[in-house]
Image (spheres, rainbow, N blue to C red):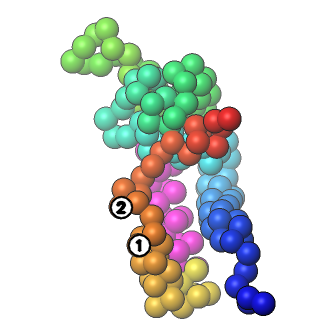
């Protein structure tokens, strides 16, 4: 009889670790003035990037339809995190960019994630956490910023 846990436990534990970190992040974001930000919004902010993007490109990056991306943009625009505009290089092209509020939320998120990582280092030990991160790097793609999780979770 094997003492190894069943195979399905590994992805569940990885997902639970993700949820713990993201839930803690959003609790802190809410305390610091961003109560309406949801986990999906982080993927959206990253996909928009520092130079902005179009709704069609945003949809492709997230793995969702242009219409779904447009609804998300509408919601984030109402909350003050993004703004629509015209591309200065091509007036026919409509772009979406992060506002100062969106940029602030991203910067705050980075600081909170650093604190959460430090908390994990305190709990697990710095060497064990670095080893865990190295192990995860060895079994995951080199490109860590796959942004299509909203579309991946939503596809049937």
Q: Outermost residue, front direction?
A: 1
Q: Quadrant of the C terminus?
A: top right
Query: Compared to 100, does 139 lie above or below?
Result: below
Is 126 in the magenta? no
Do we see residue 121 in this rendering? yes
Q: Position of residue 45 (x, y in %)?
A: 47, 41
Foreground residue among 100 and 88: 88
What stretch of residues is rendered in magenta?
102-119
Q: Is residue 135 above or below residue 54?
A: below
- Taking the view exactly as shown, the residue that stands out farthest to the left is 89
* Residue 72, horizontal then vertical, whole percent: 59, 29
Q: Marks 1/2: CA distance?
A: 8 Å
Residue 15 position in % (x across, y down): 66, 62
Label 1 crowd bin: few (<14), some (14–19), many (20+), radius 10 Å: few
Q: Which mark is residue 142?
A: 2
Element on which disc 2 rests: loop
Q: Which residue is mark 1?
A: 138
The residue drawn where x is 25% and y is 18% is: 88
- Residue 19 sits in quarter: bottom right
Residue 126 appears in the rendering: no
Do the residues bearing badges 1 and 2 touch, measured as CB atoms within 8 Å?
no
* Mark number, residue 35: none
Quadrant of the frame with the N terminus: bottom right
Say left or right for 24 vs 111. right
């Amino acid at each position: 009889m094997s003492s190894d846990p069943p195979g399905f436990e590994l992805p569940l534990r990885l997902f639970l670790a993700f949820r713990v970190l993201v839930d803690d992040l959003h609790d802190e974001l809410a305390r610091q003035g961003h109560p309406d930000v949801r986990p999906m919004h982080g993927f959206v902010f990253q996909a928009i990037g520092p130079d902005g993007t179009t709704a069609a490109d945003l949809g492709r990056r997230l793995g969702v339809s242009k219409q779904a991306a447009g609804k998300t943009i509408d919601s984030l625009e109402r909350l003050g995190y993004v703004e629509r505009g015209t591309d200065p290089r091509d007036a026919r092209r409509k772009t979406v960019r992060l506002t100062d509020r969106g940029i602030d939320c991203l910067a705050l998120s980075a600081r909170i994630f650093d604190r959460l990582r430090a908390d994990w280092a305190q709990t697990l030990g710095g060497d064990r956490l670095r080893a865990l991160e190295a192990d995860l790097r060895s079994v995951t793609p080199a490109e860590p910023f796959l942004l299509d999780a909203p579309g991946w979770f939503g596809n049937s």
